[in-house]
Amino acid sequence: MVKQRWVVTAKRADFEAISKQFNIDPVMARILRNRDLLTSEDIERFLSGDMNSLRDPHLLKDIDKAALILKEKIKEKKKIRIIGDYDVDGICSTYILLKGLKVMGADVDTVIPHRIKDGYGLNDNLINSAHEDGIDTILTCDNGISAFSQVELAKSLNMDVIITDHHEVPYEMDGDKKRYIVPDALAVVDPKQEDCKYPFKSICGAFVSFKLISIMLGGEHDEVIDELIPFAAMATVCDVMELLDENRVIVKEGIKRMSNPVNIGLKALCMVTGLKDKDILSYHFGFVLGPTINATGRLDTAKRALELFSTDSFNEASIIATQLKELNDSRKAITEEGTQKASEIIDNSSIKDDRVLVIYLEDTHESIAGIIAGRIKEKYYKPTIVLTEAEDGIKGSGRSIEDYDMYEELTKVKHIFTKYGGHKMAAGVSLANKGDVETLRKLLNENCILGEKELTKKLVIDVPMPLSYINMNLVESFSMLEPCGVGNPKPMFATSNVSLLSYEKRGKQRVIGKLKVKDEAGRRFDMVYFDSLEDFDTFLIDNFGQEKFDELLNGRCQDGDINIKLAYYPDINEYNNIRTIQIVMKYYDV
């Protein structure tokens, strides 16, 4: 297990007053304050926000201009081409724009770049192809903010370009100041623009697309909006946006509509992934539906996912959804193999001493690099870039940790890249040749100022809370915190002097730990642990000895023989219609 430093959040507020005003437990009031909810209005939006709570889309710079231009193009029957991206956000953005524009009668088609042949975003081939096809207007989504030369090429071919994006705006250093620059398109809609007055910057590309279509529909076609909300929600989760403010609202509303989605493709996808008739959570967007959609852009072409959402035939949707699931199963196997190789390279070389990990996996499919980088980052808690051989050089993806702004750090060495882009926590890079890999590794580590503190994973505790405080009403109230995810994690509690009484391993592979525990007040609880039991076993043996460990496994451990400190959250276990409280252990220490 990665070493952790436990930090208790100690933000101040009148918790009793908040508790009374909103009729919630003081513990819940503390959790809300820990999510930086300062005012009654903030708390009200968090707990009860609906579609009326969304931010005013007209505040987005150029969005009204983009809507007006598109309406004129539709009126003049000009050919419009949407150019998206091959990940979940790009696919959902593309579908939202396609559906909305078609409803309005647009002559519109789509192109999603091929991950390997085209790479990310606009390129000259896509522009020239659009010209050959008689396209009048190119509309980007989830890309375009860095497409300077491509916009100029389109203009030289008498095509108009409208950009909708959410990525960081490129900049040049002018002395000590950043000078932000955007492509010279007819309209550029990106909340990250310096002069954009939009109050909440952290929305994904699909949410930007949703806002544009909402403005264009002007309060009509409620059934279309209802269909599109889950796409904006799923993209928000899968693009790892913080589930706060209006992101939380759109995800909550999207989940609500997933009980019976309007879109036939979504229905089929739920069916083949085993989610039909189940309560959908943000987890299912991020770890079940999202990866299945993503797999088509990684190992095949993202057009298949777009076809899934566009079809009116449930039979065709079922066939495509099944294909996507099979692709995702294949992707999982490739990912496991690549992660294992990367770990071996790190553990058996000087790379293990680096503060920024740059790993070259020659034979790994380039589409899997980002997933492997994420796995390695979690395992070693270091910023990680995984690179592999591509048709036109070396390509890769990076994933970062909290205290390392990957986009900023890559910008400092941008001369080494043929192409790069991203944001604080993730990035994509291209290098000319294999020789640049070691140079990149050297430069990033020479520039790195991360110390031991930053490279030790921080475990944020919401409230130190003894197990004896827990009751069914409190645990049930935590459902108000859903949807949980980045920026709004499941609440984390901590307590000490928890005595372990018995321990058994369950599940087909014996990878689930089931324990009986007792707290200082003498209350007994069932506790489960889902992470590495091998690490947990080692921890117990190292700290309490093999004899006590064996007694614990045999259920003969005496109260007080093995006492641990644990970070946890309480949950409800339902079996045979009987509901009981169980403790989910997340981390442990002595």
Image (cartoon, rainbow, N blue to C red):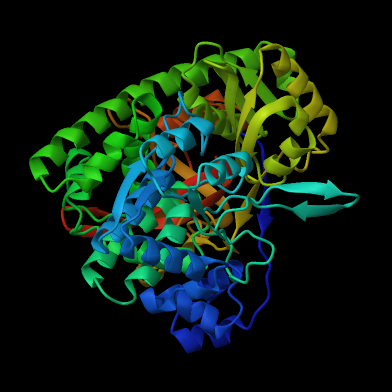
Task: Give the side of residue 585 with respect to residue 251, left or right.
Answer: right
- Residue 303 in picture, x, y percent from top left: 31, 36
- Residue 387 in picture, x, y percent from top left: 59, 21
- Residue 375 in picture, x, y percent from top left: 53, 31
Asked where in the image residue 507 lies, by quadrant, the reply is: top left
Q: Is residue 331 above or below residue 428?
A: above
Res. 469 visible in picture: no
Q: Is residue 496 above or below residue 61?
A: above
- Residue 42 in picture, x, y percent from top left: 54, 78
Asked where in the image residue 104 lies, by quadrant, the reply is: bottom left
Viewer-proximal residue among 439 and 255: 439
Q: Is residue 116 above or below residue 98?
A: above
From this viewpoint, which residue is outermost toward the right? 175
Viewer-proximal residue among 390 and 357: 390
Task: Give the side of residue 573 with respect to residue 200, left or right.
Answer: left
Res. 237 visible in picture: yes
- The residue at 65%/79% (across/down) is 13
